[in-house]
Image (tube, rainbow, N blue to C red):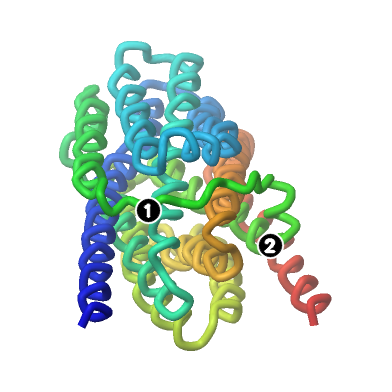
């Protein structure tokens, strides 16, 4: 009887924790899904070059990378929940002050500071969810987490199409939504996990333990950040109006939403590595198809949805595999290393694509993405062969 009661209490605590983190991830995803195209489109309509847009977009992941090594220290001193709340407040403040300091350099500084907040909220959300999961249900739980976050990201651009980017209202709206996202986390403070003290996992150790995951996360960052920030710009330069351009982004994010459930179920039942290889190949292939279907009024939408789904699915599978390989004491540090690699790609991708589009035209975007994926596929084959 006592064992049944303990199981019931633990089950209720897990449901409460998952509910809080899922609601928070949806709301935070809504704010950040609006913020990424909002920043790039606001600069585009005000005459900024694609290269300058790339620099501003890259500033947030750069800040995240600088912040990642200290996340473990902050958790040790403040606790997981307090560190997450602090991160959300930092992002909200940075968004709220951007309209009053418009310019390339001030916005780079603002987005860099926001990267510190994003590091806390993002890394520790994934760490919290992974800590709740087991090897038997990790795929489904992480897929559920990714669904809620992707749903928020998908609705974010829709909000921008409704409000528009001609005024500064979307910035204040995104900041307010982000503050709201912290409320469910605070209400679940009694079930927030107490992680073992960080063991000081360095990026080098984590990369040495799982190099293939880190390289694939890097490529996923290149693709995902480019999709979120430059697909609207790419579409506008190919002759579409801004609303249609943002709907294209919504199609990409909708694909990330639809793919998560089958990814989680398949990963739990049949294994992760084969699915990882399949998604890697499909990300390269569908990225290369974009110029050929862009002006086809029917084909473009499923191609964008599939491309978004398999590209973000790469990151989902990396998180699932990370939870399989690292214990609770080293999970936060390893997660920080993986996110840092992903965000490294988020810096490289927009900057490279911005310069490619300025120098070679809009189709510099798919060319950069395909050329960046081919070496990763080759490395995957080499790793699998040498591992055998």
Q: Nearer the viewer, residue 356 or 162?
A: 162
In the rendered image, the residue lying farthest to the bottom is 270
Q: Which mark is residue 193?
A: 1
Is residue 186 shown above or below 142?
A: above
Foreground label between 1 and 2: 1
In the rendered image, the residue lying farthest to the top is 101
As drawn, is 375 to the left or to the right of 78?
Answer: right
Residue 46, quarter of picture: top left
Is residue 385 shown above or below 358?
A: below
Q: Nearer the viewer, residue 327 or 221?
A: 327
Q: Secondary structure at mark 2?
A: loop
Q: Report x, y in % for residue 94.
A: 36, 23
At 73% from the left edge and 52% from the top edge, which residue is drawn?
Answer: 205
Identify the mark nearer the N-term, 1 or 2: 1
* Residue 51 seen in the figure: yes
At 66% from the left edge and 48% from the top edge, which residue is drawn?
Answer: 201
Q: Report x, y in % for residue 19.
A: 22, 59
Are there few (<14), some (14-19), or many (20+) residues within 10 Å of tag 2?
A: some
Q: Which mark is residue 210?
A: 2
């Amino acid at each position: 009887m006592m064992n049944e009661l303990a199981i019931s209490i633990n089950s209720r605590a897990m449901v409460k924790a998952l509910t809080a983190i899922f609601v928070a991830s949806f709301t935070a995803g809504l704010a950040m899904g609006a913020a990424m195209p909002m920043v790039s489109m606001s600069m585009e309509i005000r005459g900024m070059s694609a290269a300058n847009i790339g620099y501003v977009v890259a500033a947030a992941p750069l800040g995240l990378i600088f912040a990642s090594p200290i996340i473990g220290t902050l958790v040790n001193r403040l606790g997981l929940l307090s560190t997450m709340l602090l991160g959300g407040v930092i992002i909200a403040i940075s968004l709220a002050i951007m309209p009053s300091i418009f310019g390339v350099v001030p916005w780079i500084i603002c987005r860099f500071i926001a990267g510190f907040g994003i590091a806390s909220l993002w890394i520790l959300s994934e760490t919290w969810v992974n800590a709740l999961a087991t090897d038997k249900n990790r795929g489904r739980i992480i897929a559920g987490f990714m669904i809620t976050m992707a749903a928020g990201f998908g609705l974010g651009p829709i909000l921008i199409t409704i409000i528009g980017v001609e005024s500064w209202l979307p910035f204040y709206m995104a900041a307010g939504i982000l503050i709201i996202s912290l409320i469910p986390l605070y209400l679940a403070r009694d079930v927030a996990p107490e992680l073992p003290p960080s063991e000081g996992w360095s990026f080098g150790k984590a990369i040495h333990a799982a190099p293939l995951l880190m390289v694939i996360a890097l490529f996923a960052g290149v693709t995902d950040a480019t999709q979120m920030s430059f697909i609207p710009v790419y579409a506008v330069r190919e002759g579409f109006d801004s609303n249609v351009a943002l709907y294209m982004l919504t199609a990409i994010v909708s694909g990330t939403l639809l793919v998560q459930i089958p990814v989680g179920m398949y990963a739990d039942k049949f294994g992760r590595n084969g699915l990882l290889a399949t998604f890697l190949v499909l990300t390269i292939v569908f990225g290369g198809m974009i110029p050929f279907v862009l002006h086809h009024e029917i084909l473009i939408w499923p191609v964008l949805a599939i491309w978004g789904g398999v590209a973000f699915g790469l990151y989902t599978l990396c998180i699932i595999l990370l939870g399989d390989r690292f214990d609770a004491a080293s999970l936060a540090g390893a997660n920080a290393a993986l996110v840092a690699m992903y965000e490294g790609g988020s810096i490289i991708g927009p900057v490279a694509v911005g310069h490619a589009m300025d120098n070679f035209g809009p189709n510099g975007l798919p060319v950069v993405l395909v050329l960046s994926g081919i070496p990763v596929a080759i490395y995957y084959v080499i790793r699998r062969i040498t591992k055998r």
